[in-house]
Amino acid sequence: MASSMKSLFSDHSRYVESFRRFLNNSTEHQCMQQFMDEKLPGILARIGDTKSEIKILSIGGGAELVAKTSNLENIKFTWHKETSSEYQNRMMEKKELQKWDFIHMIQMLYYVKDIPATLKFFHSLLATRAKILITLVSETSGWDKLWKKYGSHLPQDDLCQYVTSSDLMQMLDKLRIKYECYDLLSTMDISDCFIDGNENGDLLWDFLTETCNFSTTAPPDLKAEIMKDLQDPEFSVKKEGKVLFNNSLSFIVVEA
């Protein structure tokens, strides 16, 4: 059934545009900023109690958000930014593992092939009292229901896997790694998805389903079923004439 549908990742420019529409129509960045403002200063202060400098490893971006965090003017940051696999491969070649005080992985574990091995590797790089901050979609979000129900009907892609906070916490439990989890509500306005031929809606459909041109290539019965579910309270809330998809995020703070 999914043979006529192509993964969104097969068309880079379409993916970039659909991601831009997602950011424009969601409170994703506001939600992250709320965490950075309310929770992160305390976390970093506990790490930096006895340190004049905090060494931060940024995996997959998000450095800008952490850099803007208030109340940290006394701490000097040294940054290192790389993709997960690039960094792992380089460290393995060098055979020397630098320790870090704070590692953050913001919305990037979906693109990692072996998540438990990646968690284990980066956990081994933590200095005393150091922490890893992992951000990804919450098990309470609409994404969790969407992926579980429709993932097998949508194009499968090696580049991206469906993983939410519940999957991640199970992996951490198996590895016997301690963590705390904070959930914050975020929404995405998907009202345009219900207007036939709406360009913004079509691009949001692509982002929701990770399918290139979903609106025109998906079997009509599949689209109708997803469209019906997206209006269900399990997936979205209706407010002031808008349909707001549950885009809630989990912020998982992993202990050394």
Image (tube, grey):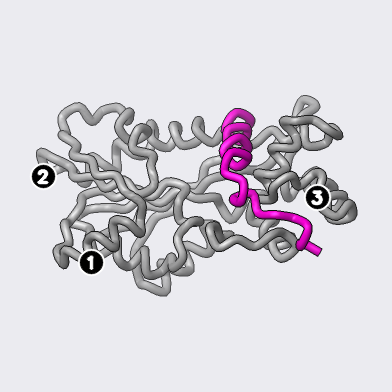
Q: Mark 3 belongs to which amino acid?
A: Thr
Q: Nearer the viewer, residue 64 or 73?
A: 64
| Label placed on residue 161 | none
Q: Mark 2 belongs to which amino acid?
A: Thr
Gap between marks 1 and 2, in whole Å? 30 Å
Vertical position of residue 3 compared to residue 198: above or below: below
Q: Residue at x 42, y 74 (%)?
A: 174
Q: Percent position (x, y) of residue 190?
A: 72, 35
Residue bearing the label numbered 2: 50
**Mark 1, other Cα within 10 Å: few <14 / some 14–19 / many ≥20:** few
**Mark 3, other Cα within 10 Å: few <14 / some 14–19 / many ≥20:** some
Q: Residue at x 85, y 53 (%)?
A: 225
Vertical position of residue 162 compared to residue 57: above or below: below
In which quadrant will I find the C terminus? bottom left
Q: Mark 1 belongs to which amino acid?
A: Met
Vertical position of residue 184 compared to residue 164: above or below: above
Kind of element beneath mark 2: loop
The reply to whether residue 128 is in sight is: no
| Label placed on residue 217 | 3
Nearer the N terminus, badge 1 or badge 2?
2
Kind of element beneath mark 1: helix
Residue bearing the label numbered 1: 92
Vertical position of residue 35 compared to residue 254: above or below: above
State the extent of the magenta-drawn residues as a range. Answer: 1-25
Magenta stretch, main secondary structure, is helix
Q: Percent position (x, y) of residue 24?
A: 60, 28
Q: Residue at x 69, y 38 (%)?
A: 204
Q: Nearer the viewer, mark 1 or mark 2?
A: 1
Q: Nearer the viewer, residue 217 or 52?
A: 217
